[in-house]
Amino acid sequence: MSPLRLPRLLTLTVVLLLAAGLSGCAPREPALDFRVSLFDGSWFSLADQHGKSSVVLNFWYPSCAPCRQEMPHLEQAWRDFQDEDVRFVALFVPRGFDSEQDARDFVDEYGLTFDFATDRGQTVAQQYGIEFYPTTYFIDRDGKVARVVTRNMDLETIVEILESMGLG
């Protein structure tokens, strides 16, 4: 190997390792359990889903432009897959000036029908190591992380991931 290629190879290796470490859970690792109160007043616990449902767990906040762009795609995917064993849960992570009321107003304005909750104190986001928004975890029925996406997704991408998990 030429002396000029070695630094590039090392740089690429470091970049790939850093990219792999951006999320709190690596794919195929058990997802970290949490319990939150949903906007409708019921409770959601990730552990309660094990063996029953896959989970699409989205971290977002209302003033995040990519989050806003992604929400209609998540809603359509939810509508397309709601008869499958999958739950869509969007955790509003309080950031900046966004309040829970802003998040609730956003849900109403967009007519979103899947589950929403507030990540009070950003405890779940910290537990999952969330640094960028939106971030979405795709968790299989066994409670393992199947995929982590740190960007806004279109419907086609969401559907492809769900189908790769055996849904649909």
Image (cartoon, grey):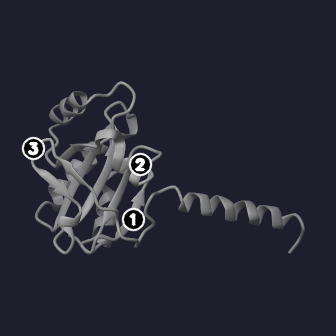
* 83 lies left or right of 33: left
- Is 9 in front, or is 32? 32
Above or below, 131 against 12 in this view is above
Assess whether mark 3 and mark 2 are in contact (beta carbons under 8 angstroms).
no
Numbered disc 1: secondary structure: strand
Residue position for label 2 = 126
Q: CA distance from mark 2 to mark 3?
A: 23 Å
Q: CA distance from mark 2 to mark 1?
A: 18 Å
- Residue count near mark 3 (Cα–Cα under 10 Å), binned few <14, some 14–19, many ≥20: few
* 20 lies left or right of 120: right
Residue position for label 1 = 147
Instruction: Give the quadrant of the C terminus.
Output: bottom left
- Is 128 in front, or is 107? 128
Q: Amino acid at mark 2?
A: Gln
Hey, which residue is sitting farthest right in the picture? 3
Disc sitting over residue 41 in the figure = 3
Residue 153: image location, x then y, percent: 37, 51
Q: Amino acid at mark 3?
A: Gly
Q: Is residue 160 visible?
A: no
Residue 118: image location, x then y, percent: 25, 41
